Image: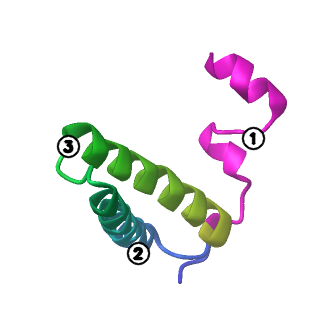
Amino acid sequence: MGPYGVRAGWRILLYAVLVVVLASAGGMVLGALGLANSFTGNNVAILAASVVAGWGMLAAVDRRPIGALGFALEPAAVRDTA
């Protein structure tokens, strides 16, 4: 622990471990659906794992809202995305 909480190196390691664990879980789900070996299925699993791990790290470690990553959950988000 540093003066500002968890040090950067540990944050990066924790994020990487979370991404690997979540992507593996997503891969198993896609495997059960028969989509595990598709290029798109693998990329979707990794992207979803990265976003969820980022949200989890932001909420648990940094104690900031998930909107701080640029993914604000508000009604205007759908319009802005479109």
Contact between labelled residues 2 and 1, with CB atoms less than 8 Å apart = no
Q: Is residue 3 magenta?
A: no
The image quarter containing residue 43 is top left
The residue stretch that appears in magenta: 62-82
Above-or-below relation of 1 to 26: below
Could you say where residue 82 lies in the image, as x and y percent from the top left? 62, 15
Q: Which residue is mark 1?
A: 73
The local crowd at label 2, few if under 14, some if 14 to 19, many if 20 or more residues have their Cα within 10 Å, is few
Q: Which residue is mark 2?
A: 10
Amino acid under disc 3: Ser
Quick one: 77 or 29, which is closer to the camera?
29
Amino acid under disc 1: Leu
Mark number displayed over residue 38? 3
In space, the residues marked 1 and 2 are separated at their CA atoms by 28 Å
Mark 2 or mark 3, which is nearer to you?
3
Q: Secondary structure at mark 1?
A: loop
